[in-house]
Amino acid sequence: MRHYLTTPIYYVNARPHLGHAYTTIINDILTRFHKLAGYETYFLTGTDEHGDKIVQAAAQANVSPKEYADQISALFRAAWPPLSVETDDFIRTTEPRHQNVVTRFLDLVNSKGDVYFGEYGGHYCFGCERFYTEKELVDGLCPDHQTKPDFVSEKNYFFRLSAYQDWLIDYIEKRPDFIRPEGYRSEVLGFLREPLEDLCLTRPKSRLTWGITVPFDSNFVTYVWFDALINYVSALGWPDGELFAKFWPAAQHTIAKDILKPHAIFWPIMLKAAGLPIYRHLNVHGYWRIGQSKMSKSVGNVVEALSMADKYGSDPFRYFLAREMSFGLDSDFSEDRLVDRYNADLANDLGNLCQRATAMLVKFSGGRIPWRLADAADVEWRKRLERTRSTYESAFLSFNPKGALIAVWELVGYLNKSVDLEAPWALAKDPLKKDHLDAVLARLAEGLAYIGALIWPVLPKTATEIWRRLGLNPNRFSLDFAAIFSQLPHDRPLIADAPLFPRIEVAKGQDSGPKSESAPKSQDLKKPTKPAEEPSAVSQAQKVAPAAASSLSQIALSDFQKIQLVVGEILTAEAISGSEKLLKMTVSLGEAQTRTICAGVAKFYRPQDLVGRRVVVLANLAPAKLMGIVSQGMLLAASQDGQLALLAPDSPLPAGAKIS
Ligand code: MSP
């Protein structure tokens, strides 16, 4: 089976921004997934360069449309490689190879009788480059741009969309996954319940010359949408290109909901009219919003949002976009959310696993992945891997990258937990448990290797790094875990290196926006500062340090129950004069009276950043006087290597909520 994936070709009237990056990255992820599964793939992106919009933008920039298109198209082309996006082709609608195909396509539909000449008067929005009917306007304004459209009456050529309406309804109804997710399919079918109007196919040159001249009347240029959609076949060399024969039957387009109608209605009808097979799937995603508002190109922060990839690295950026958005629905983008995901999923879960696994292999097996005998736990282990693989695959095949990532992170969580349960550091103390220890360590290496393969579509650099550390050849990524395990080297030591994702500490409570200074720069992320150590210190983020935990004396549950831990809300916070370490806070524990608590966090938090935060408070600690102030409780914090983080519930439960 083959797969041909496409992004929309982007207008060259705006610089690349977060929205463009999302669609392009998601396509790259899906392309890589198909490669991983052993399919042949072809991935196309490009730029849409004709029409009024571009003429206007060029005029504003005081250059010709062609010069303008050249400049912006180059920005798009250059935007993708730094995000690890690898495309097979980049098409521009101003290229002769595209223009020739558009001409041929027009000739074909004209010769079949689907084009006629007529007069049309209507409300034309230049922003949308389309006519609106009276009914579609909202208070007389364009629903998208909130501007008053111009009334334009002119003679033009029309394409008979209406003749194909019944065919299209039938086609969509028979194919439940033609347009997906389902919500968008219903939307299109809903739209098709009203009679379709024919499509105005041309613009007179008296009004617009920046377009492809129609072959049957040199006084007209082609309507930009009719021109643009054809890119999906012109790039493959329709009609007789080899690529066309090979990949067109495997086509799926990915777009956001803004351009559903041209893709779900115009394009299948154009293909049908020209006698071409219809594409296989239309994958439609929602919108990224920033600060609750629908993102639009006029808002500079959408471009700045793209700079988050420079700041935190392209892998974390890709991971965030794929993990955060439920495909089809809208999502909110914020730097805080990105940092939270980075710390929780990448630093804590994945980074920690890699660190612990490699450090333990070094410590307990001299860095070599032990040979192991099949044991009773193997059956369960293989079943688990099969389950991960099948959930992962079916999520990707139904265009659900988030679901695929959740499946991988379940495996990450399972392995992290199994380290705690199996306690290799304890097994290592007993020579009789050597076989068991070897099996545990080998399975850990296997699990890490498989996770490396599974994350490759989303986190290609991290995957390659994990495989490098394990001594595997990254050209052999695949979904076949048995094949991967058979390539694990047993004769040379693996590499235990610095943490993959050093934790990012940011002053919370302010959506720092792209300007935050406290987080490391991407180059810092690529050169983590601290080398890996053995299990007890493997990660700053690790919840239980195994060696330390195992050496502590045990307590009974009743001992623990003596400790009264509750959620507190910090109401005020201030510095204490004469103390570099302490801050004085008023904290609500949901009691009638607030408490005064002094905590040694002044070096790590600014008072104003603490106000409003939920924290974990030891409520029944005997009061103590600190710098002359009676402190009535203690805030819990984790610390290591000179860093400190206050503990907090991971959703904002009310002050006074019990912790047990
Ligand atoms: N040129 C047309 C497409 C022609 S395809 C034959 C066009 N270009 S565009 O530059 O406006 O790009 C629109 C696409 O950019 C959306 O469909 C989506 O892929 C992406 N996005 C733009 N803003 C977006 C968001 N706020 N959120 C997610 N994706 C967004 O339309």
Image (cartoon, helix red, strand yellow):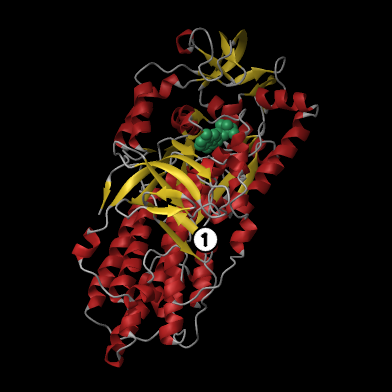
**Residue 412: quadrant of the picture:** bottom left
Q: Is residue 217 left or right of residue 555?
A: right
Could you tell me which secondary element the residue under label 1 belongs to?
A: strand
Q: Position of residue 17 (x, y in %)?
A: 60, 39
**Residue 612: quadrant of the picture:** top left
Q: Is residue 416 visible?
A: yes
**Dot 1 amino acid type:** Gln
- Crowding around mark 1 (Cα neighbors within 10 Å: few <14, some 14 to 19, many 20+) is few
Indicate the quadrant of ligand 1 in the picture: top right
**103 and 368: which is toward the camera:** 368
Q: Position of residue 658 (x, y in %)?
A: 26, 48
Q: Where is 122 relative to 411, above or below?
A: above
Q: Is residue 249 left or right of residue 388?
A: right
**634 and 408: which is toward the camera:** 634
For image coordinates 34% across by 80% down, the residue present is: 424
Q: Where is 514 relative to 165, above or below?
A: below
* Quadrant placement of the N terminus: bottom left
Q: Position of residue 251 (x, y in %)?
A: 47, 45
**196 and 23: which is toward the camera:** 23
Q: Is residue 39 visible?
A: no
Q: Where is 505 relative to 427, above or below?
A: above
Q: Position of residue 578 (x, y in %)?
A: 58, 51
Read off the residue under disc 1: 643
Q: Is residue 304 left or right of residue 644?
A: right
Q: Where is 639 relative to 11, above or below?
A: below
* Quadrant placement of the C terminus: bottom left
